[in-house]
Image (cartoon, grey):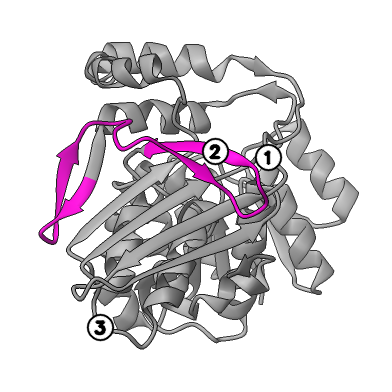
Amino acid sequence: MSIWVLGATGRVGRAVTTRLLDRGETVVLVGRESARLRERAANTGLRVVVADTADRIAAAIEEERPAVVINTIGSYAETAATIARACVRGGGHYLDQAADLTAVPRLLGLHDEAAAAGSTLVTGAGFGVMATEAVVATLCEGRPAPADVRVDAVASVAIEEGALGTALAASIIDVLVTGGRRYRDGRLTSSRIGAGARRLLLPDGEQATTSEAPSAELLAAHRSGGAPAVTSTTALMPASPVLRAVLPFAGRLLALEPVRRFAIRRMAAVTTKAAPGPRTHSWGHAVVTWPDGTTREGWLKTGDAMDFTAGVSAEVAVRLARGEGKPGAYTPAAAFGPDLAIAAGGEIS
């Protein structure tokens, strides 16, 4: 039984493929026709499936019925449900690295459909959900529902040389368009993007400034602990108070579709130079408070956040291929427990 890697020439796709091959798995590379895909196949000796749209990928999945499909192509809000449903119809399993508040709830909404077919769907299988979800799940294990949770994602990512790309550009723009979000009284409500900024002293002595942004980490933390109040921050937001102040205005402007399309095109074409990550480690952090005033704090430490994402995705794929998943749709810790983060290379303290 094979594991298909969609977006096999991208950074995460390449890293996941290498990890799977190291573990003796049968891997098929899936992507649009390109010299990079053919070169990757020639270098690894792996089979290639050429498909350049979600519908064509779905058709190939239904025809060939792979055991597991790993979706690394991005644009999850537009593509994930189509591809995941094809996996369900083919009797296989699916996972992606979505971390936004559109794609993740949409995939979790396929729970009953997947459960009825005996398929497992896992969304958020990367640093962007797992790093904080694992900490919340660990802190809340065996305890009643907390009153309040705050999670902070401090990713450190080495930059590769090359164009930013459409998928990443669209993700950045859509965060600004969505605006701030937080849970209050058990409901997802609006807040000001970039609010709640604070300077975190990290366990290794380094520091990072984080502030609020719309993220599926909110949803995962809410589901993990059941707290009616949840706040999620990230170090990927601008540290400058001036820049944070203009974010809401930029979001309203980018909500105009012609402006959004133009901004994505321009940003996707931006060429970056190779550079190391801004910090030695990446961190997931959570502070959980219970109604009686008890507070617990926890950290997840890992290396480069993209490497951790590849580790989470590969570990989930192997477990699904071995039949260890439970039918339905889940975030990663909900599917396999917080120790999945440790198996993927993280440390929880």
Q: Is residue 225 magenta?
A: no
State yes or no: residue 191 in magenta.
yes
Residue 229 at what x, y percent from top left?
Answer: 20, 58
The percent coordinates of residue 83 (x first, y second) are 43, 56
Amino acid type, callout 1: Arg
Q: Quadrant of residue 139?
A: bottom left
Pointer 3: residues within 10 angstroms few (<14), some, or many (20+)?
Answer: few
| Range covered by the magenta-colored residues | 182-211
* Label 1: which secondary element: loop
Position of residue 336 relative to residue 265, above or below, is below
Q: How many marks?
A: 3
Kindly identify the amino acid type of the residue bearing the numbered disc 3: Pro
The residue depicted at 35 percent of the width and 81 percent of the height is 117
Q: At 60% across and 24% down in the image, what residue appears?
A: 164
The earlier-in-sequence mark between 3 and 2 is 3
Quarter-of-image position of residue 151:
bottom left
Which quadrant holds the C terminus? bottom right
Residue 285: % across, % down: 48, 57
The CA span between labels 3 and 2 is 31 Å
Pointer 1 residue: 279
- What separation in Å lies between label 2 and label 1 (alpha carbons)? 9 Å
User: Residue 208: which disc?
Assistant: 2
Of the residues shown, which amino acid type is indicated by label 2?
Ala
Asked if disc 2 and disc 1 are in contact, CB closer than 8 Å, the reply is yes
Asked if the residue under mark 2 is in contact with the one under mark 3, i.e. CB atoms within 8 Å, the reply is no
| Secondary-structure class at tag 3 | loop
